[in-house]
Image (cartoon, rainbow, N blue to C red):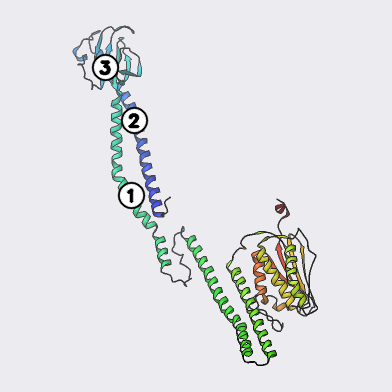
C-alpha cells in the first residue's frame, strides 16, 4: 500500500496517461486496419476495371497479347491477376500470373489460400464473357497497418517523459499548501494554541485546518482547566495539611495526656479529610478527561441504590441518621451506563445527605420511572440550599457558608459530571429552611424491547 500522497498521485496520473495512450494507439491501429482493408479492396476493384478497359482495346477474343502476359513472380510477389475466356467452369484461354492463388472464378470479394499464404481476391466479368480476377496478399495489409501504428506511437516516446515531468512538477505545486501547513505546525511551541489561518487555504485543506483549530481550542480549554484544577487542588490541600501539622506540633509539645490525645484525634481527622479530598480530586480528574462513560452495561438503579444504602447505613446510624430506601422499582429502573461511575454518584449523594442532616433526621432514597426516564430522588432533613445558590454548588470547591460541615466542595461537581456523561440531569427540590430537601437525578431508561432482545 502506498502511504505517500505524492507517490499515490504520481502513480494514478502516470498510469492513467499510459493507459489512455495505449487505448488510443490500439483504437488507431484497429481503425487504420479497417480503413486499409477498405482501401485495398477498392484498389482491387479499380485494378479489375483497368483490366476490362485494356481488354476492350484488344482484338476480339485475343488473350495472347504480350502486354497481358505477367512474368513469373517470385515468392515475394504481392499482387497477381488472371483473365479467362470461355464459359464458367472451363479454363478456355487463360493469361496472367502463373501462381495465381485459385483456379476457380467467383464474382465479388473473397479470401483464398495458396502455399500457406492468404490472398484477397476480387472477381468480375466483362460484356464479352471474359472472367477477370485480381488478388493481393493479405500480409501486405498487415504490414501497412503495422507501419502506420509505429508512426502513431512515435510521439509517445517524447510525450510520456514530457508528461511525467509536468505531472511531477504539478503534483509538487499542488501539495505545496500541505507542506506549508506542516512547516507552520512544526514551528509552533507546545503551548501555542492559536488557530491556524484558513483564509488562503485550498478548499480541500480547509476542513482539515478547521478540525485542527477545533482541536487546538479543546486542548487550550483542557490545559486551562488543568491549570485551574491544579491551583485549586493545591489551595484546598493546604488546609488539611496545615491542620495535620498544627495538631501534630501540639501533640508533640503537650504534656497532658488528654490534650495530647485530642490533638492526635485532630491529626487523624485532618488525615481523613485530606484522604477524602484526594479521592474526590482523582475521581473528578478522571471525569474531566473522559468524553464518554467508557464500557457500558445495563445497570439496575434500584439494585445499585439498595447496595449503596446498605454500605452507608451503619455509618449513618452511628451519627443518629435513619437512612433507608423506598419505592424501589425492581427490574424496571434500568439504564445503560458505567456501574462504577453510577455507584460513585450515588455514594456522593447519600454521603452529602447524611452529612448535612441533623441527628435524629431521616434520609430516603427512592426510584421511579416517568416518561422513559429513571428518576432518582435523595431526600434529607437538612438545611437545604437557597435557590440563588443552587447552581453555584456545582462549581468545584464551592461550599455553602454556614453549613457547619467541612466538605471539600467536589461532591456535587462529580455528581453532575457523571449524570451528564450518562445523558442525565441534576435538579433540586425545595430550598433553604423548608425542612426537607431533595436532589433529583434524571437518567434515560433503557428501551424494554431492546432490553428483552
Q: Is residue 219 above or below residue 356?
A: above
Relative depth, front residue between 62 and 187? 187
Q: Secondary structure at mark 1?
A: helix
Residue 249 seen in render = yes
CA distance for labels 2 and 1: 30 Å
Residue at (36% x, 32% y) in the render: 30
Residue at (61% x, 63% y) in the render: 292
Q: Earlier in the sequence, mark 1 or mark 3?
A: 3
CA distance for labels 2 and 3: 24 Å
Q: Is residue 236 above or below residue 82?
A: below
Q: Is residue 220 left or right of residue 73?
A: right
Quadrant of the image occupied by residue 250: bottom right
Quadrant of the image occupied by residue 186: bottom left
Check if mark 1's residue and mark 3's residue have beta carbons within 8 Å: no
- Label 1 crowd bin: few (<14), some (14–19), many (20+), radius 10 Å: some
- Label 3 crowd bin: few (<14), some (14–19), many (20+), radius 10 Å: many
Residue at (66% x, 70% y) in the render: 416
Residue 344, position in %: x, y? 67, 69
Q: Which mark is residue 33?
A: 2
Relative depth, front residue between 93 and 120? 120
Q: Which mark is residue 27?
A: none
Q: Which mark is residue 164?
A: 1
Residue 438 seen in render = no
Relative depth, front residue between 325 and 105? 325
Residue 137, position in %: x, y? 29, 22
Amino acid at each position: 500500500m502506498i502511504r505517500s500522497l505524492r507517490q499515490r498521485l504520481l502513480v494514478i496520473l502516470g498510469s492513467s496517461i499510459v493507459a489512455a495512450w495505449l487505448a488510443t494507439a490500439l483504437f488507431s491501429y484497429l481503425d487504420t486496419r479497417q480503413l486499409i482493408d477498405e482501401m485495398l479492396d477498392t484498389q482491387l476493384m479499380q485494378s479489375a476495371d483497368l483490366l476490362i478497359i485494356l481488354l476492350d482495346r484488344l482484338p476480339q477474343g485475343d488473350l495472347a497479347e504480350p502486354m497481358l502476359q505477367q512474368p513469373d513472380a517470385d515468392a515475394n510477389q504481392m499482387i497477381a491477376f488472371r483473365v479467362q475466356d470461355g464459359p464458367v467452369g472451363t479454363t478456355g484461354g487463360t493469361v496472367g500470373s502463373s501462381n495465381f492463388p485459385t483456379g476457380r472464378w467467383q464474382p465479388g470479394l473473397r479470401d483464398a489460400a495458396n502455399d500457406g499464404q492468404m490472398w484477397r481476391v476480387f472477381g468480375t466479368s466483362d460484356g464479352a464473357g471474359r472472367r477477370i480476377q485480381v488478388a493481393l496478399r493479405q500480409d501486405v495489409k498487415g504490414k501497412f497497418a503495422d507501419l502506420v501504428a509505429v508512426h502513431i506511437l512515435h510521439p509517445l516516446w517524447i510525450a510520456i517523459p514530457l508528461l511525467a515531468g509536468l505531472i511531477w512538477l504539478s503534483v509538487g505545486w499542488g501539495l505545496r499548501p500541505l507542506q506549508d501547513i506542516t512547516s507552520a505546525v512544526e514551528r509552533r511551541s507546545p503551548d501555542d494554541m492559536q488557530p491556524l489561518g484558513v483564509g488562503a487555504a485550498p478548499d480541500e485543506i480547509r476542513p482539515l485546518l478547521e478540525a485542527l483549530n477545533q482541536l487546538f481550542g479543546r486542548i487550550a480549554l483542557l490545559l486551562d482547566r488543568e491549570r485551574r484544577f491544579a491551583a485549586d487542588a493545591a489551595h484546598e490541600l493546604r488546609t488539611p495539611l496545615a491542620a495535620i501539622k498544627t495538631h501534630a506540633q501540639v501533640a508533640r509539645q503537650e504534656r497532658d495526656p488528654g490534650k495530647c490525645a485530642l490533638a492526635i484525634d485532630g491529626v487523624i481527622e485532618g488525615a481523613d479529610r485530606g484522604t477524602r479530598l484526594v479521592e474526590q480530586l482523582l475521581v473528578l480528574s478522571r471525569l474531566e478527561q473522559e468524553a464518554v462513560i467508557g464500557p457500558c452495561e445495563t445497570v439496575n438503579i434500584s439494585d445499585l441504590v439498595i447496595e449503596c444504602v446498605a454500605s452507608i447505613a451503619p455509618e449513618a446510624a452511628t451519627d443518629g441518621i435513619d437512612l433507608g430506601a423506598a419505592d424501589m422499582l425492581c427490574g424496571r429502573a434500568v439504564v445503560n451506563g458505567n456501574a462504577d461511575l453510577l455507584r460513585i454518584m450515588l455514594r456522593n449523594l447519600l454521603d452529602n445527605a447524611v452529612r448535612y442532616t441533623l441527628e435524629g433526621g431521616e434520609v430516603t432514597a427512592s426510584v421511579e420511572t416517568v416518561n422513559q426516564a429513571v428518576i432518582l430522588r435523595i431526600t434529607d432533613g437538612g438545611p437545604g440550599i437557597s435557590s440563588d445558590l443552587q447552581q453555584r454548588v456545582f462549581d468545584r470547591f464551592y461550599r455553602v457558608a454556614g453549613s457547619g460541615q467541612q466538605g471539600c466542595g467536589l461532591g456535587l461537581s462529580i455528581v453532575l459530571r457523571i449524570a451528564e456523561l450518562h445523558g442525565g440531569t441534576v435538579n433540586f427540590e425545595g430550598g433553604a429552611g423548608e425542612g426537607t430537601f431533595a436532589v433529583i437525578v434524571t437518567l434515560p431508561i433503557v428501551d424494554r424491547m431492546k432490553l428483552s432482545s
